[in-house]
Amino acid sequence: MTVRFTTHLADGREIFYFDRLPGADRSAVDQRTDLPPAHTTSQIRWDPLFRDYTTVAGHRQQRTYKPPADLCPLCASKDGKHTEIPADDYEVVVFENRFPSYSLNSADVVPLIDEPPFRSGPGAGRAEVVAFTSNHDLPFSQLPPEHVRTVIDAWADRTTGLSAYGSIDYVFCFENRGEEIGVTLSHPHGQIYGYPFVPPRFYKAGEAFEHHLERAGTCLQCDLMKAECEDGSRIVTTSEHWVAYVPFAARWPYEVRLVPRRHVPDLPALDDAERDDLARTYLTVLKAFDGLFDTPTPYIAGWQQAPVRRAREVWHLAAEIFTIRRAPGKLKYLAGSESGAAVWVNDIAPETAAQRLREAVPT
Amino acid sequence: MTVRFTTHLADGREIFYFDRLPGADRSAVDQRTDLPPAHTTSQIRWDPLFRDYTTVAGHRQQRTYKPPADLCPLCASKDGKHTEIPADDYEVVVFENRFPSYSLNSADVVPLIDEPPFRSGPGAGRAEVVAFTSNHDLPFSQLPPEHVRTVIDAWADRTTGLSAYGSIDYVFCFENRGEEIGVTLSHPHGQIYGYPFVPPRFYKAGEAFEHHLERAGTCLQCDLMKAECEDGSRIVTTSEHWVAYVPFAARWPYEVRLVPRRHVPDLPALDDAERDDLARTYLTVLKAFDGLFDTPTPYIAGWQQAPVRRAREVWHLAAEIFTIRRAPGKLKYLAGSESGAAVWVNDIAPETAAQRLREAVPT
């Protein structure tokens, strides 16, 4: 049972403490008197040629960039230092990003423009930061399973919370780990974006779920999982409630899809047993990634949940975890083909990647 | 008038020399006797969930990685060294990549699999390398305009050449410049991919052109160009035949769309005057990019041409040039939002980017 305590930072942003047991005092008040009011000009613009939204967030250029450890904004506030987290200790914390890509406030300051071909509007979503642990040096993969369970509960709780805002159409919980992929704060943390539209990749997946149900009468994700289990060559690890495999058409050197065996649309729909099992299985997958190389593997991990208002019945939850490292010291860059044409070229066969990941699963 | 001379390398790959004037002797024979036959297992796999092709090219893991300058495979062959280019000098050369993402030969060795949900087939396309100049240290932006004209003619010629293969559906000419975006050979060069399918980004643009023509009766690219010229705030430079502007919904910190004023589908359709003017205008844009920072700007530049067999009537050619550098020493990384959800967050407003690029245009 996870306990949530909600309060506000000095500039009005929300902060949520998640604890495994009741009793912890998280009522500390943010002591910072010099914090300017949170302000954002986040804007979404429509690209009529490539039929995508782009988000323009000019205020983010000034965001905190690789601060020294003693100025870490994600550590707890103590020894006279005031961070983003007022309490002097915490388990898992979620708070609104001070340099957000999206903000509900932007609706008040960013106009709606509808002068074709120019169309834009406020980025009326939300960007939250998840501090996974108060321990500055403990990577996610080293957290105890019961602590990961609290993280999972926090993700699920915030998914429900953000889904309640009328302007938010998709909730995306993700972690960027490693300087190689541009992480500017080394404290173990993830992010939650409440997008004011359904991201194009997930919009397409929603359509794929719908088409497959119409044509085959079954869930595409369920069918893929069954086919992978029968084939076996791309399976990384399985557990009572979860299956982890490298997709047949993986885009990245090492990429894992982690799927619940039960057909559920999103994290809030997972039951207790599935969450406990997820904590262990997710750790197994992350440890396999870290076992691939001599140094910690940079990775991106994200939850593909059902959109807030569409394709919910047909959607089947999955996590996608991948690294851009293709060999020690060598990264997969998104150059002309990927960034210019949206065509991924993967130098490692998915069956090879799965075998190496299986070998890296801790015993 | 550009002259082309075609021959073969020791392992059977094609090589094309392009010269501004007739008379140069490019008949030198590839002296390498130890070159193994070109071999590729390039495969395209269908991803039924995100409805995309992924290319799997396992043989590319062994490709040449940052060789020292005296072992550069793109320099001319002389002083007893045998490179990929047998002649002892050249102007512009195109040849088949020895570690290709696509190869027509793959059709002979890679099976077609159609066992749903698993569907894959040979990557029966082509990957070519364009050496822009024999001068190892001269970046594209420093080439003389008449030399750039030869590069343009080479791009146009290879577009026509690759379009003639029945299995190639799209010809993409592009340049990756800079270690920051993963370039493994420093000799100034670009690439040409003949994709065995229409890349998803261009497939969507083809549909956008078609829908706009149906609805508005006009060309979307023409309309965008006119609207940008009238607005003016995102224009970077214009010339008699070309307009360069930062798109309203630009995804990258600095991004330019370079469009011919005349409605043409692809590079081969450009006339002499448009090509000469392009050589000068393209150099102006590249020099503006290099003027943004104290060190050479890493960039990706690619030509958005009409697909070989569809949407040709409605398509309007453009080049896209962009950098991932958002500030000195700071890159825009494609992390969770971009790589996981396909949502680009741009920290620099397009109007700001256009102003800085205009200020960096050489006078």
Image (tube, coloured by chain):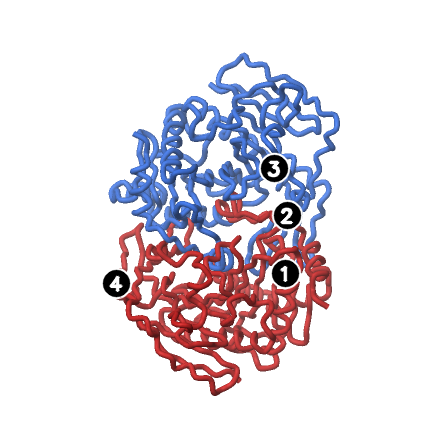
Chain colours: A blue, B red
Q: Disc 4 residue type? A: Val
Q: Which residue is mark 4?
A: B109
- What x and y, as percent, mark residue B11? 30, 70
Gap in angstroms between the C-alphas marked 1 and 3: 33 Å
Classed neighbour count for the residue bearing mark 3: other residues with Cα under 10 Å, few (<14), some (14–19), many (≥20): many
Residue sitting at 30 percent across and 38 percent down? Answer: A358
Residue sitting at 47 percent across and 79 percent down? Answer: B18
Image height of A289 relative to A154, above or below: below
Gap in angstroms between the C-alphas marked 2 and 4: 46 Å
Closest to the camera, between mark 1 and mark 2, is 1
Name the side, left or right, on which A9 lies relative to A189: right
As helix, strand or loop, the secondary structure at mark 3 comes to strand
Indicate which disc, 2 or 4, sits on the residue closer to the N terminus. 4
Kindly give the residue lying farthest to the front in the view shown. Answer: B79
Q: Which residue is mark 3?
A: A126
Gap in angstroms between the C-alphas marked 4 and 1: 43 Å
Observer able to see residue B6: yes
Closest to the camera, between mark 3 and mark 4, is 4
Classed neighbour count for the residue bearing mark 1: other residues with Cα under 10 Å, few (<14), some (14–19), many (≥20): many
Q: Disc 1 residue type? A: Phe
Residue sitting at 53 percent across and 74 percent down? Answer: B152
Gap in angstroms between the C-alphas marked 1 and 2: 17 Å
Q: Which residue is mark 2?
A: B347
Q: Disc 3 residue type? A: Arg
As helix, strand or loop, the secondary structure at mark 1 comes to helix
- What x and y, as percent, mark residue B347? 64, 47
Indicate which disc, 4 or 1, sits on the residue closer to the N terminus. 4
Q: Which residue is mark 1?
A: B289
Callout 4 and callout 1 share a chain: yes
